[in-house]
Image: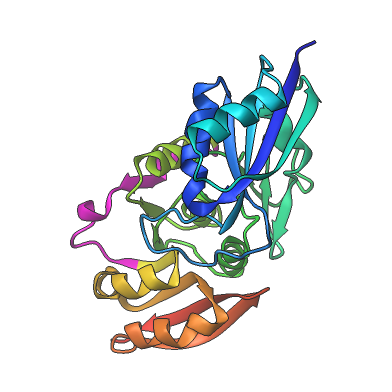
Amino acid sequence: MVEWHQISVVSSDQGSDPVAEVLTKLGAVSVTFKDAAGQPLYEPPPDSHPLWRQTLIVALFEQPLGLEAIRTTVSNALPATPLSRWNIEILADRAWELEWMDHFRAMQFGKRLWVCPSHQGPPDPEAVNLVLDPGLAFGTGTHPSTALCLEWLADQDLGGRKVIDYGCGSGILAIASVLLGAQNAIAVDIDPQALTATAANAQNNGVGNRIDCRYPGEITGETADILIANILARVLEELAPLLNHLVKPGGKLVLSGLLREQVEGVRYAYRQHFTFAATGMRENWVRLEAVRNS
C-alpha cells in the first residue's frame, strides 16, 4: 500500500503561489490552500481569486523527500517569504477521488424535491429526484444560496414555464426547474466547464433535450417566465440592465448569492422594472423574489 506524505506550511497570501510553485517542482502531486486563521472571504470581485492573509498550504507527495529537505529547499528559494508551522503527516493510500461519497448525501428541498448523489438511491422514489455528483462547476445544493433557490423552485407551479438559469454552474437549478414541470430551460454561464457540466448533468437526469446551454452573448432577444440568478451581489447589480429585459411582463425574477447587508443595493439596481415581494433567508444569505412590471 502506498503511503502519501502530506506536508503543510503557513504563509502570507502573497507568498502562497510562489511556495506552491516550489512544492510542485519538488514533486507534489497536489497543492491546496486553506484558511489558517478564520478569516472569511465573503464576496471576491469577479475574475479574482483572493487568498487568506494567513494561508495554509498543503502539499501531497507520493515519493517523500523528508520535511527538513523540503523546508530547506523552499526557504532557500524564497528567503523573503514568511513561513511557519511546518508539519508532515503520513496518509494511508485511499481512493481519493471517491472521498466525497462519505460527505455528500441526499438532501431534501421543500416537500417534493431531492438532490441525490449517484451512489445513493433516492430516499423517496415517488418524489422529484435530481441525481448530481460534485464536480468542477459550482452547485450541489449544499451552499445556502443554492438551497434557497431549490426550495423556491420546489414550491412553485412550473408547469409549461420557460426558465432562464443565469450563472448555471453545475446546471442544478435549470435541471430542477425542468424536473419540477418547466417546459424548458436555458442555462447560461461564462465558464465553458459550467456549460459542459450542465449538459452532462441534464443528460444524466433525462432532460438533456429540454435544457439549452448558452454563453451570455447567445441569449439576445430571449425572454422567460422565470429568471433565476444565483451569483454574487456585485455581479447581480452589474447585470441588472441585461436581466431586466430577459423576463416577460408579469414574469418572476429570483436573485440569490447575496448577503443580508447587500439586499438594498441589489433591490435598488432592479427597482425600475420590478416589484419585489417575498424574501427568503438561510444563515446570512438572502433570496429575493420580484415580479416584472407590465
Residue 144: within the magenta? no
Q: Position of residue 127 (x, y in %)?
A: 70, 52
Q: Residue at x 39, y 46 (%)?
A: 211
Q: Is residue 272 above or below residue 34?
A: below
Residue 115 in picture, x, y percent from top left: 66, 49
Q: Nearer the viewer, residue 230 or 46?
A: 46
| Viewport quadrant of the N terminus | top right
Relative image position of residue 14 (x, y in whole percent)? 47, 51
Residue 35 placement: quadrant: bottom right
Tell whether 9 sits left or right of 53.
right
Q: Position of residue 45 (x, y in %)?
A: 39, 64
Between residues 30 and 136, which one lies in front from this camera angle?
30
From what the image shows, is residue 51 above or below residue 279?
A: above
Q: Residue at x 32, y 87 (%)?
A: 293
- Would residue 119 be seen by someone viewing this image from the given angle? no
Based on the picture, tell me whether residue 207 belongs to the magenta stretch: yes
Left or right: 290, with 106 as reference point:
left
Viewport quadrant of the C terminus: bottom left
Image point (55%, 85%), residue name: 278
Above or below, comparing residue 94 to residue 59 in the picture: above
User: How does the figure colour the protein chain or chains?
Assistant: rainbow
Give 82 or 107, whichever is nearer the viewer. 82
Query: Does any portion of residue 123 appear in the rendered image?
Result: yes
Residue located 36% across and 55% down the image: 47
Q: How many marks?
A: 0
Query: In screen coordinates, is 207 left or right of 75?
Result: left
Per the rendered image, the range of residues in magenta is: 205-224
